Amino acid sequence: MREPDGRTYRVTGQKIWTSLAHEADWCFVLARTEPGSVRHHGLTFLLVPMDQPGRIEVRPIRQMTGTSDFNEVFFDGAHAEHVVGGEGNGWRVAMSLLGFERGVSTLAQQIGFARELEGVVRTAVETGAARDPVVRERLVRQWAELRTMRWNALRTLGGSADPGAPSVAKLLWAGWHQRLGELAVLVRGAAASVGPADWSVSSPYELDAAQHLFLFSRADTIYGGSDQIQRTIIAERVLGLPREHKGAV
């Protein structure tokens, strides 16, 4: 809803699975600003300051890892003055943002992936797991796929990629990271299932890097657009396949 001054919006509603909302100073909100509009029409991309006591409440969502990277956010008449891309153009801005998140921005993400892979390889050598030819093959495949993801992201950065490249990138890294998490606990053997020696000083529990990687990566194929969503985008917008019929069952 727009305030009488014509430039301030008042936002009421809620959003779930907001990454790092408990640490953020600002958040973006895709809000419906045109009464009576439907679907992706009549939406505006707003930047909302989080420091509004009594108007914004953040409720952390506890995960399997024991941490709360995701949150549920409640807006109760929160004020926003900053519009990105103009009123009514929110869907276009959001799609551009998601394309960047799933495509070019993964270059920075891959730096962390490379460090994680190095740690898994180092552990495999230390525990002797690397002597298993099946494990060695999986480690080499992880390395090769990471290089492929890098070249795919660079192609997107150069502007030569097709419109479906960001969705392809998301499918690639999500599955890759999950498989790396599985390898991380595999090469550690039985030690991967052992918690801290003194549970009294670890409330409710603490995970080492491999355990955290394994558990957190379970969500990779869901957040940022699930695998099913990415495949639908590729099928409809790139391959030109007919939309799925959504009639009554």
Image: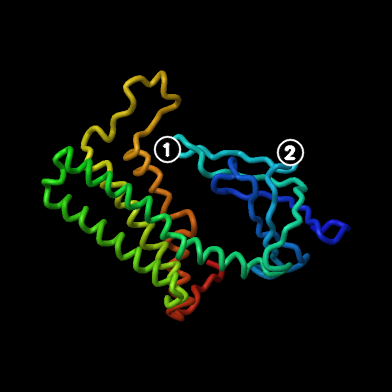
100 or 229: which is nearer to us?
100
Q: Relative to 166, does residue 125 appear above or below in the rendering?
A: above
Which residue bears the numbered disc 2?
A: 53
Compared across the picture, whether 238 is left or right of 88 comes to left
Mark 2: which secondary structure? Answer: loop
- Which residue is the site of mark 1? 65
Q: Earlier in the sequence, mark 1 or mark 2?
A: 2
Residue under the point 19% across and 43% down: 124
The spot of residue 216 in percent (x, y) is 40, 44
Q: Position of residue 153 (x, y in %)?
A: 40, 66
At label 2, the amino acid type is Pro
Residue at 46% x, 59% y is 226
Q: Is label 1 in contact with label 2 (beta carbons under 8 Å)?
A: no
Kindly identify the amino acid type of the residue bearing the numbered disc 1.
Answer: Thr
From the viewer's side, name the closer residue of 15 and 150: 150
The quadrant where residue 66 appears: top left
